[in-house]
Amino acid sequence: MRTLLLQSIVLLAILVGLPLAAADADTERLREVDAFWAKISKAVKEGDFESYKSTCHTEGVLVAGIKK
């Protein structure tokens, strides 16, 4: 009986802990994305092409959706 109680407590701790750890990872990921977009936004507003260029992949290709 005591073993079952201990197993239940461990399982509960795991089930509660996993979503909390995932939330922390999401928070950090979103913080990084926000910082990245802030850098891009500032570069575009200031017309700083070199700063904007530094945020792009070196082999990236710009595709503009211009219609005739």
Image: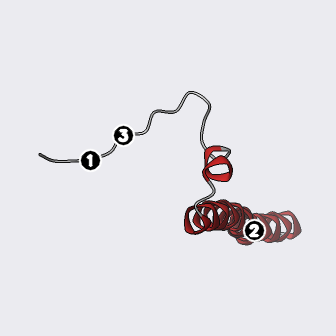
Quarter where residue 61 is shown: top left
The earlier-in-sequence mark between 2 and 3 is 2
Of the residues shown, which amino acid type is indicated by label 1?
Gly
* Residue on which disc 1 sits: 65
- Of residues 28 and 47, the one drawn nearer to the viewer in this rendering: 47
Alpha-carbon distance for marks 3 and 1?
Answer: 7 Å
Q: Nearer the viewer, mark 2 or mark 3?
A: 3
Q: Is residue 58 above or below residue 49?
A: above
Check the image and name the residue furthest to the top. 59
Question: Regarding mark 1 in the picture, which secondary structure is present there?
Answer: loop
Q: Residues within 10 Å of mark 2 (few under 14, many from 20)?
A: few
Check the image and name the residue furthest to the left. 68
In the image, what residue occupies the spot 58% across and 66% down?
A: 41
In the image, what residue occupies the spot 88% across and 69% down?
A: 2
Residue 65 pos. (x, y %): 26, 47
Residue 53 pos. (x, y %): 62, 44
In the image, what residue occupies the spot 67% across and 62% down?
A: 39
Question: Regarding mark 2 in the picture, which secondary structure is present there?
Answer: helix
* Residue on which disc 2 sits: 24
Of the residues shown, which amino acid type is indicated by label 2?
Asp
Check the image and name the residue furthest to the front. 47
Q: Residues within 10 Å of mark 3 (few under 14, many from 20)?
A: few
Alpha-carbon distance for marks 2 and 1?
Answer: 37 Å
Q: Is residue 12 above or below residue 40?
A: below
* Residue on which disc 3 sits: 63
Q: Residues within 10 Å of mark 1 (few under 14, many from 20)?
A: few
The earlier-in-sequence mark between 2 and 1 is 2
Residue 22 pos. (x, y %): 69, 63
Alpha-carbon distance for marks 2 and 3?
Answer: 35 Å
